[in-house]
Amino acid sequence: MQQLEEDIKAAIRNIPDFPKPGINFKDVTPIFKDPALCSRILDGFSSHFENKGIDAILGIESRGFLFGLALATRMRLPFVLVRKVGKLPAKTVKLSYALEYGEATIEIHEDALEKGWNVLVHDDLLATGGTASAAAQLCEQVGAKVSGFSFLVDLSFLNGKAVLNKKFPDAEIVGLATY
Ligand code: AMP
């Protein structure tokens, strides 16, 4: 696992001051050019969550779709999407949450999850935890339960894990590469 973390970090490209001054953007796109690394990442996630009774994986737009669907396929689980408002075609449930500046609205198809399902929420990166927490709240609003969170990257100095732990104390939180 240690080696996997090192290899993920070696592949990630740091882009200073993107998309605005002061943000050190973690560009995960080079990872997708390395199929052997992608496969080990899927092994890493699935080893944490197999035999945990997960019923579905939820990916957060947009980079959460990439490993999200691949992991769901690997684990033979349904995959569902949380998208920015206005993109999902059928009837949805929406949630607005605060960003550093302003707010964002995300939504899920109201019939995407069965009542009582145990859901694993997936995104590429955990920063303050606001996005993952809003996606998890949407799961609960449509009657499902959040059993876990998985991220490629955890920016631990922003304390997102503590935010998720407080709101979803029963959920296991996994970040494969921690900064
Ligand atoms: P947060 O809601 O603060 O946890 O932010 C997480 C969301 O913002 C994820 O969907 C990330 O893809 C994106 N994000 C936040 N900070 C960064 C960063 N430094 N590099 C890349 N993506 C980021």
Image (tube, rainbow, N blue to C red):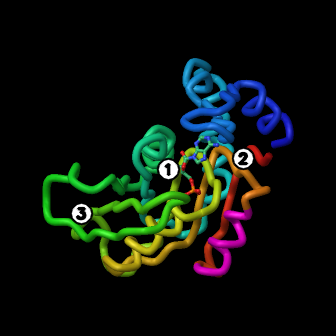
Residue nearest the viewer, comparing 163 with 5: 163
Residue found 33% across the figure and 53% down from its top: 83
Instruction: Check residue 19 for magenta coloring.
Output: no
Residue nearest the viewer, comparing 70 with 123: 123
Amino acid type, residue under disc 3 in the picture: His
Residue 109 placed where, x, y %? 24, 63
Mark identifier at residue 176: 2
* Mark 1–mark 3 distance (CA, rounded to whole Å): 22 Å
Main secondary structure along the magenta-highlighted residues: helix
**Which residue is disc 1 drawn over?**
75
Residue found 34% across the figure and 62% down from its top: 105
Q: Residues within 10 Å of mark 3 (few under 14, many from 20)?
A: some
Q: Is residue 5 above or below residue 164?
A: above
- In terms of secondary structure, where does tag 1 sit? loop
Mark identifier at residue 109: 3
Give the mark, 2 or 1, whose residue is nearer the N terminus: 1
Of tags 1 and 3, the one toward the viewer is 3
User: Is the CB atom of the residue marked by disc 1 within 8 angstroms of ligand 1's nearest atom?
Assistant: no
Among the 4 quarters of the image, the one containing residue 34 = top right
Amino acid type, residue under disc 2 in the picture: Leu
Residue 40 placed where, x, y %? 67, 34
Provide the residue span drawn in magenta: 159-167
User: Is the CB atom of the residue marked by disc 2 within 8 angstroms of ligand 1's nearest atom?
Assistant: no
Q: Residues within 10 Å of mark 1 (few under 14, many from 20)?
A: many
Residue 118 placed where, x, y %? 47, 72
In the rendered structure, are the residues bearing label 2 and label 3 in contact, judged by CB atoms less than 8 Å apart?
no
Is residue 12 something one can see in this rendering?
no
